[in-house]
Amino acid sequence: MSDDFELETLALHTGIHRSQFNEHSEALYLTSSYVFDSAAQAAARFSGAEPGNIYSRFTNPTVTAFEERLAALEGAEACVATSSGMSAILSCVMGLLSAGDHVIASRSLFGATVNLFNNILKRFGVETTFVSATDVAAWQAAVKANTKLLFIETPSNPLTEISDIAALAAVARKAGAWLAVDNCFCSPILQRPLELGADLVIHSATKYLDGQGRVLGGAVLGNRELVMEKGIHGFLRTAGPTLSAFNAWVILKGIETLKIRMEAHSANAMEIACWLEKQPNVARVYYPGLASHPQYELARQQQKTGGGIVSFEMKGGKEAAWQVVDATRLISITANLGDTKSTLTHPATTTHARITQEARDAAGITEGLLRIAVGLEAVQDIKADLARGLQGL
Ligand SMILES: *Cc1c(COP(=O)(O)O)cnc(C)c1O
């Protein structure tokens, strides 16, 4: 595909390699292995002398189509698809790091990501220092001789803090380390971290890329050397956290509508955020599209809209927050996000319940905090559903 095409065009046409049947929609190849014409061809495929599919733990044509399409959208040379967002982060780390290496990570990461760095990777000799998502000087100060990876999520979950991608890319470059950006909240439609100097982009395709709450998936993107040669693809091929062909096909279809969905999620979220700011029982609203957001200017430079996630803090703490959750009839009470249907979460007792109180406090996840992943319902219906709990207080 030509680089001249716009993102919405690439999202429809990249990665299509028609079979002999000339199907119009992407084919779904449900096959675990591939046959060879001869012993010599099998040997050539296994040795790498001849490109081509061998076994679906390594590559599969439907998965490859997804990888090519997402790479085109992120402006990346290479993409490795994984079975989930968490396995994308694991593959990135296991592919690139060794015992004795040091990671600097944002304090405001997805709960499972914090646990992965803190509890699991630590046992394998990879040490992580957690610093503020927004304080570039703290990242610089945390650099050690063995620092290999800087890891951020922007906007962060659930407080929508914005990390300065270009500034942290400069810190990473100076330290001889890589900067990885979890681009889950924005998707490449709203933010392209590689253009801002990041080395790696991570996705949970479970969220906006599928966009309809159906399957799990993930991806790691970057230049060919990092992703294909340095060990990320090698880890996947050996350890097997591979994306299934069926899930790849579902996500491919999701990506076709990514741009119009991201724009619609953003428009609804902006309206909900503005409305929440006027509610007397709401202490504070966190949304990068609001002028009251502490990094509003940075968000405007770095991403196209504020995105689809709005968090807000109730004045009455946990009791008030739970009351809003329990009064909903339309919005789903679920921890997922990036679905067409609006979802509401109380992070302190769900997504962030397993991290320590200390880590929760440091990340600003209070008992009164709620996160709404604004869906594609009519915005007045979402407001009415929240209003019941807000006004019943
Ligand atoms: C959900 C999520 C993940 C993990 O993705 P899974 O597909 O659930 O494994 C990672 N990062 C962020 C920001 C997420 O929201």
Image (cartoon, rainbow, N blue to C red):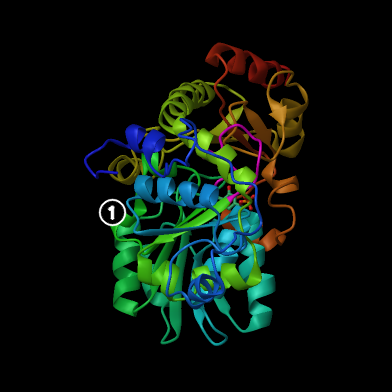
Q: For the stretch drawn in magenta, what is the main secondary structure?
A: loop
Q: Quadrant of the C terminus?
A: top right
- Nearer to us in this view, 193 or 82: 82
User: What amino acid type is highlighted by mark number 1?
Assistant: Glu
Q: Is residue 260 visible?
A: yes
Residue 205, compared with residue 9, is above or below; it is: below
Point out the residue furthest to the left here: 4
In the depicted structure, whether residue 273 falls above or below residue 219:
above
Q: Nearer the viewer, residue 3 or 310?
A: 3
Q: Nearer the viewer, residue 64 or 158?
A: 64
Residue 201, x across and y down, in percent: 43, 57
Q: Position of residue 85 (x, y in %)?
A: 59, 54
Residue range in magenta is 205-217
* Residue 139 in sight: no
Q: How many marks?
A: 1
Residue at x 48%, y 27% (from the top left corner): 265
Mark 1, other Cα within 10 Å: few <14 / some 14–19 / many ≥20 = few
Classify 292 as above or below 388.
below
Snapshot quadrant of residue 303: top left
Give coordinates of residue 364: x percent, y percent.
58, 51
What kind of element bears circle 1?
helix
**Quadrant of the snapshot with the N terminus:** top left
Residue position for label 1:
195
Residue 77, picture quadrant: bottom left
Q: Please report the residue visible at 38 percent of the width from the left and 42 percent of the height from the top.
A: 14
369 part of magenta stretch: no
